[in-house]
């Protein structure tokens, strides 16, 4: 990168920039004192396999930006020449930030992240970076890239995660007024008491960590709470955390987007919500083979041991044998409407452009002869077939399962597109033979923008991940239909999806994936249904689905769908996640909405009303399905296992009958619901005499 300018502080406390000395040391010289130690000691192993980290690591620097064109000339030239890669994640700057970066550092990797928020930008950068070590710095000139060697030194000495502290001996800040300082101190003390450790600084974004630590740090923290999110995750996961002193200067140009009270609340919420995240995670606790090599607290080094091993949230995932075989993946995209043709093309292209190639891409057309002819004519390199079963999404998916060739079958909607590492991240957990199904997160892309009255806790209404789902790899009851995968052998053994459930045309009903996931656990209680949020797809949300009318309809039909699942799988299983969501997640959402009202934000009233109405509509839809003297009959696991197999592996198109159609043996019948536009929803109710 050439010679770097130096940064000094004059007697007035102002930052001065000047030419760098000609003898800027390479990375080898920076690390030479510690490399001898690092090569002689065993390295931390995440998978327990005894892997050794690279003793000649590459370093990627991740910089989130939003209108930082004036500041980049004061930051990019200071990045040491030995840095392997600079990843600039831009959030839609309008001042030429990207152009300035290309001019100053042509070799920089530029990634555009349209979703707002510093946290979202950093997570995007983590997935895009290729270095062994990832470092994060701000673009406003407040952080000195020349301090990078001390972070790399600590990582090479044995740390998993290194964070800067403005309050250690040798550190300072020129950009924190009294209120923020007191707030940071109070929040830091809260983390100490809840998570353990001895952090001296909580809300600072100069961090560095090994790339293999990203699964433990990733999650849902879109804004300025990202630093707190990463810090408490590192503690809760039992990582080796080291603090190093750092200097924070004032922002050079522009105005900070940080809001003391709003973002302080978000930090506190993150501390509380993340308290049990790792205890629910299926990630194995890293097996730290040695402690970090430090210089002692007085010299500015402070190893963090994390929470006490006796704490209930510090657990190690059970050891399981690993399958040696490499799994292959068939990707299935079901479609029914020619109006979505361009979206279908985008979906297919995204599956083709993967870091791990799919064994095949299957497009199933649901009883639309014209669309089927067009797909066969224009989709090259794709297996196109018509739905051989009854109309609807379940029948289309079952058709694909009968014909797919790979060991894993993944499903994605025709109005979604996958990120480039989607297949790779879906397949990775299948190395554990106990994992039966893996699904990922679904990010909403709103055509008309997100309505300010639409609560994040209700993003399931538009088929997307919602607030309340795990933000780290963890077992769940069921996956999201837009982004899920299963072992092919298991799906064939369990007869696939129930065709009495699921969408059909524009019918908003669903829950067929919920019923299947529950049936998997009922058949094998040791089976794991896993949610991997880093396996991401983006789901197109048209303007027609961002209306209050659609919200009302979807909530009501969701209640009825849950009633149908309760009849098939048992009410306890069918409502377990909903009960948790109602009691743990929605109260926080309601408090947030009421807080907006207190800040005189008119949208707070609408959001509060939406949460209350959404709960009422789902509940009424569930209860209403049992009116007129009928009641829901819950079928337990024993009844489920007595059903005759559908034999999905048979070639005859009509070989797979709906399990719901056989419920007559249990004195049940399927009756259509004609309430609202969802007229094809099947609900199992006890026959009235």
Image: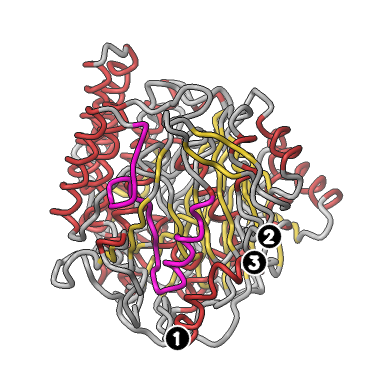
- Left or right: where 341 falls relative to 660: right
Q: Would you name the residue on which mark 1 appears?
A: 49
Q: CA distance from mark 2 to mark 3?
A: 13 Å
Q: Would you name the residue on which mark 2 appears?
A: 354
- Left or right: where 514 falls relative to 427: left
Q: Is residue 87 above or below residue 450?
A: below
Q: Would you name the residue on which mark 3 appears?
A: 330
Residue at coordinates 31% horizontally, 24% vertically from top-left? 610
Residue at coordinates 19% horizontally, 57% vertically from top-left? 195
Q: Nearer the viewer, residue 35 or 525?
A: 35
Count residues near mark 3 (Cα–Cα under 10 Å), then give few for <14, some for 14-19, many for 20+. many
- Left or right: where 600 falls relative to 120: left
- Looking at the picture, how far across and down is residue 680, in whole percent? 46, 39
- Looking at the picture, how far across and down is residue 260, in whole percent? 30, 27
The answer to whether residue 259 shows anywhere in this view is yes
Q: Nearer the viewer, residue 633 or 528?
A: 528
Q: Quadrant of residue 616?
A: top left
């Amino acid at each position: 990168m050439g010679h770097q300018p130096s940064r000094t502080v004059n007697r007035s406390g102002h930052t001065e920039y000047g030419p760098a000395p000609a003898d800027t040391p390479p990375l080898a010289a920076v690390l030479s004192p510690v490399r001898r130690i690092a090569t002689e000691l065993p390295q931390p192993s995440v998978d327990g396999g005894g892997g050794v980290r690279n003793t000649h690591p590459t370093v990627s620097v991740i910089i989130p930006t939003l209108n930082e064109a004036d500041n980049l000339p004061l930051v990019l030239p200071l990045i040491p020449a030995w840095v392997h890669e600079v990843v600039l994640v831009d959030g839609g700057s309008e001042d030429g930030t990207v152009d300035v970066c290309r001019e100053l550092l042509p070799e920089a990797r530029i990634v555009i992240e349209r979703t707002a928020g510093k946290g979202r930008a950093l997570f995007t950068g983590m997935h895009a970076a290729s270095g062994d070590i990832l470092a994060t710095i701000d673009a406003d000139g407040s952080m000195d890239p020349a301090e990078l060697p001390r972070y790399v030194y600590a990582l090479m000495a044995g740390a998993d995660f290194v964070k800067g502290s403005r309050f250690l001996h040798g550190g300072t800040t020129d950009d924190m007024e009294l209120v923020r300082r007191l707030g940071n101190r109070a929040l830091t003390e809260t983390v100490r008491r809840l998570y353990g450790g001895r952090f001296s600084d909580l809300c600072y974004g100069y961090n560095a960590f090994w790339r293999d630590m990203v699964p433990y740090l990733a999650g849902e923290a879109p804004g300025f709470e990202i630093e707190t999110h990463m810090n408490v995750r590192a503690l809760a996961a039992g990582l080796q955390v080291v603090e190093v002193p750092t200097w924070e200067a004032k922002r050079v140009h522009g105005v900070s987007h940080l809001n003391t009270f709003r973002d302080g609340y978000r930090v506190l919420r993150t501390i509380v919500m993340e308290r049990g995240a790792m205890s629910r995670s299926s990630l194995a606790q890293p097996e730290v083979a040695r402690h970090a090599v430090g210089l002692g607290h007085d010299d500015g080094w402070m190893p963090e041991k994390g929470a006490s091993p006796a704490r209930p949230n510090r657990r190690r995932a059970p050891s399981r044998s690993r399958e040696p075989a490499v799994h292959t993946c068939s990707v299935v995209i079901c479609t029914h409407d020619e109006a979505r043709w361009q979206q279908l093309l985008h979906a297919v292209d995204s599956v083709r452009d993967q870091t791990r190639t799919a064994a095949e891409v299957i497009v199933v057309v649901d009883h639309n002869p014209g669309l089927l002819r067009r797909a066969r004519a224009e989709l090259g390199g794709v297996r196109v077939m018509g739905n051989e079963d009854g109309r609807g999404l379940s029948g289309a998916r079952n058709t694909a399962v009968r014909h797919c060739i790979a060991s894993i079958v993944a499903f994605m909607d025709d109005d979604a597109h996958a990120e480039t590492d989607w297949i790779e991240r879906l397949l990775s957990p299948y190395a554990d033979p106990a994992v039966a199904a893996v699904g990922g997160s679904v990010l909403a892309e709103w055509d008309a923008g997100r309505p300010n009255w639409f609560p994040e806790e209700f993003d399931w209404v538009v088929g997307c991940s919602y607030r309340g789902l795990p933000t780290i790899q963890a077992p769940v009851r069921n996956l999201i239909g837009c982004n899920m995968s299963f072992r092919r052998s298991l799906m064939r053994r369990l007869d696939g999806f129930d065709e009495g459930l699921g969408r059909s045309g524009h019918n908003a009903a669903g829950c067929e994936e919920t019923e299947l996931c529950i049936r998997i656990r009922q058949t094998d209680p040791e089976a794991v249904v896993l949610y991997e949020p880093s396996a991401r797809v983006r789901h197109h949300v048209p303007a027609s689905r961002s209306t209050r009318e659609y919200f009302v309809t979807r909530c009501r039909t969701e209640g009825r769908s849950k009633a149908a699942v309760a009849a098939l799988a048992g009410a306890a299983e069918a409502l377990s996640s909903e009960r948790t969501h109602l009691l743990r997640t929605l109260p926080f959402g309601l408090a947030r909405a009421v807080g907006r009202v207190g800040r005189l934000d008119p949208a707070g009233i609408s959001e509060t009303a939406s949460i209350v109405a959404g709960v009422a509509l789902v509940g009424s839809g569930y209860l209403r399905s049992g009116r007129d003297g009928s009641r829901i009959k819950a079928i337990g696991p024993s009844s489920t296992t007595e059903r005759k197999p559908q034999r999905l592996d048979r070639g005859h198109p009509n070989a797979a009958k709906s399990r719901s159609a056989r419920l007559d043996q249990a004195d049940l019948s399927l009756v259509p619901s004609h309430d609202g536009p969802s007229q094809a929803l099947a609900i199992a109710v006890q026959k009235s005499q």
